Image (tube, rainbow, N blue to C red):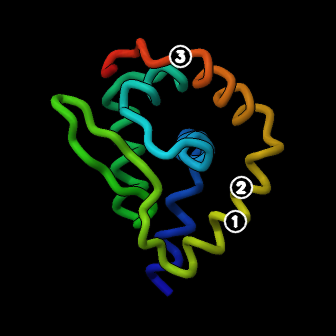
């Protein structure tokens, strides 16, 4: 039960939901992509990404000084069920839609390209 509570709690923050919405549409994103789209400092973005990773949502890989994140490939059954629900809910969310639009306009000339 504690693990379930931690998974659900990890989604209780708007910034983390925005991050999840972006990753549901992208294979992988760099911290700098999140910073640009969410218009938040690196420390804030990294803290939220770390929280999601610790809850089992994300995988990461280092490329130079930047870390790239993606949805974990080995999600638990609980995670997979919630991903399906999140896809449905976040697809219709106005804030998530604006974030996706901002991401599409970034191009690859962002900081880590």
Tag in front: 2 or 3:
3
Disc 2 element: helix
Q: Is residue 66 above or below residue 90?
A: above
* Among the two numbered marks 1 and 3 on one chain, the one whose residue lies closer to the N terminus: 1
Q: CA distance from mark 2 to mark 3?
A: 22 Å
Crowd rating for badge 3 (residues with CA inside 10 Å; few <14, some 14–19, many 20+): few
The total of numbered circles placed on residues is 3
- Judged from the image, the secondary structure of the residue bearing numbered disc 3 is helix
* Residue receiving disc 2: 87
Badge 2 density bin: few <14, some 14–19, many ≥20, Cα 10 Å:
some
Quadrant containing the C terminus is top left
Q: Are marks 2 and 1 in contact (CB under 8 Å)?
A: yes
Instruction: Name the residue at the top extreme.
Output: 109
* Left or right: 15 in relation to 61: right
Q: Earlier in the sequence, mark 2 or mark 3?
A: 2
Question: Which residue does the image show at 45% across and 82% down from the upper left?
Answer: 2
Identified at 55% across, 71% down, the residue is: 79
Which residue in the structure is indicated by mark 3?
A: 106
* Residue 112 on image: x %, y %: 31, 21
Secondary structure beneath label 1: helix
Q: Residue 36: x, y in percent?
A: 48, 19
In the rendered structure, are the residues bearing label 1 and label 3 in contact, judged by CB atoms less than 8 Å apart? no
Residue projecting furthest to the right: 92
In the picture of the structure, the residue carrying the numbered disc 1 is: 84
């Amino acid at each position: 039960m504690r693990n379930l509570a931690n998974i659900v709690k990890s989604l209780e923050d708007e910034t983390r939901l925005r991050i999840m919405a972006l990753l549901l549409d992208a294979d992988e994103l760099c911290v700098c992509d999140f910073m640009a789209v969410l218009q938040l400092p690196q420390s804030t973005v990294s803290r939220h990404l770390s929280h999601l990773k610790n809850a089992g949502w994300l995988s990461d890989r280092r490329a130079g000084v930047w870390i790239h994140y993606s949805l974990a490939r080995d999600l638990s059954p609980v995670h997979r069920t919630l991903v399906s629900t999140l896809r449905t809910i976040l697809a219709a969310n106005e804030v998530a839609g604006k974030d996706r639009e901002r991401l599409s306009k970034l191009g690859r000339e962002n900081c880590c390209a």
